[in-house]
Image (spheres, rainbow, N blue to C red):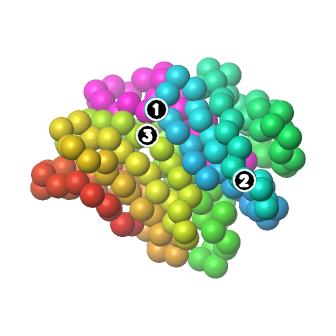
Amino acid sequence: MRIDAPVEYQPEMIARLKLLYDVAATQRANAAEGLSFASIRLDGDRGLLMVTPPGCDAIECQVDYSTSSRDVLRDVIAAQGISLRAAPPDDGTFGMPKDDDPPLLQHAWVMKMVAYGVDPWTVYGRSWAGDLLEIRLAHLSTEALFRIDGLASLVVVNVNHAEPSRRIGLNYAVVDRISRLVDEGDAGIIHL
């Protein structure tokens, strides 16, 4: 997902964020069963999801950004032989997890917060441009991988599921921390 000019309406970015938001809802609806979205790649013409059913190896699913919806996402995954529950319609609530909720619910929350609103990625002040390449589940954390223009190595934002920084405003915190890193001429891992 390209993060570039400070222009509010960017249809390609909005479509990618919507897919990530729908993936987060699907993750939340299926966390108790152990279904996980191990990786969500946002840098291609289609979203590339690595879905891990309970007790099985990851299965690759591709989702077209232009037709993405929670129902389409469910159908694409079910077509791979994976059984899953439908994500409920968005009721407008945040559904913030408790500190002791399982990692897959925490992962859903982090994805939702990264995808929540376009302002942090468009008109909000930042000192960099680049690409959000991938969101992936790590051990007790969710990672977001960025390629930042002018930096040789990737920037990895690691959001610990047990830390309070995963609360509302996480998307702005990610932008701010990357800006600080870029302003210092650094690259590496950011822990939130």
Answer with left or right where residue 184 lies relative to residue 141: left
Residue at image mark 3: 133
**Three-letter amino acid code at disc 3?**
Leu
Please say if the residues under marks 1 and 3 sit with CB atoms less than 8 Å apart.
yes
Mark 3 nearby-residue class (10 Å; few <14, some 14–19, many ≥20): some
Residue at 66% from the left image edge and 63% from the top image edge? 104
Q: Position of residue 43 (x, y in %)?
A: 46, 32
Main SS, magenta region, reads helix
Residue at 31% from the left image edge and 51% from the top image edge? 155
* Image: magenta residue range: 1-26
Q: Position of residue 137 (x, y in %)?
A: 56, 58
**Three-letter amino acid code at disc 2?**
Asp
Mark 1 nearby-residue class (10 Å; few <14, some 14–19, many ≥20): some
* SS at badge 2: loop
* SS at badge 1: loop
Q: Earlier in the sequence, mark 1 or mark 3?
A: 1
* SS at badge 3: strand
Residue 92 seen: no
Q: Which quadrant of the structure image shows residue 5? A: top left
**Three-letter amino acid code at disc 1?**
Asp
What whole-number distance in Å separates the C-alpha atoms at marks 2 and 1? 23 Å
Asked if residue 144 is positioned above or below residue 120 in the image, the reply reads below
Asked if the magenta segment contains residue 133, the reply would be: no
Q: Earlier in the sequence, mark 2 or mark 1?
A: 1
Farthest bottom residue?
100
Residue at 71% from the left image edge and 44% from the top image edge? 59
Give the position of the C terminus as an image quadrant: bottom left
Residue at image mark 1: 43
What whole-number distance in Å separates the C-alpha atoms at marks 2 and 3? 22 Å
Residue at image mark 2: 57
Q: Position of residue 32 (x, y in %)?
A: 79, 64
Residue 44 seen: yes
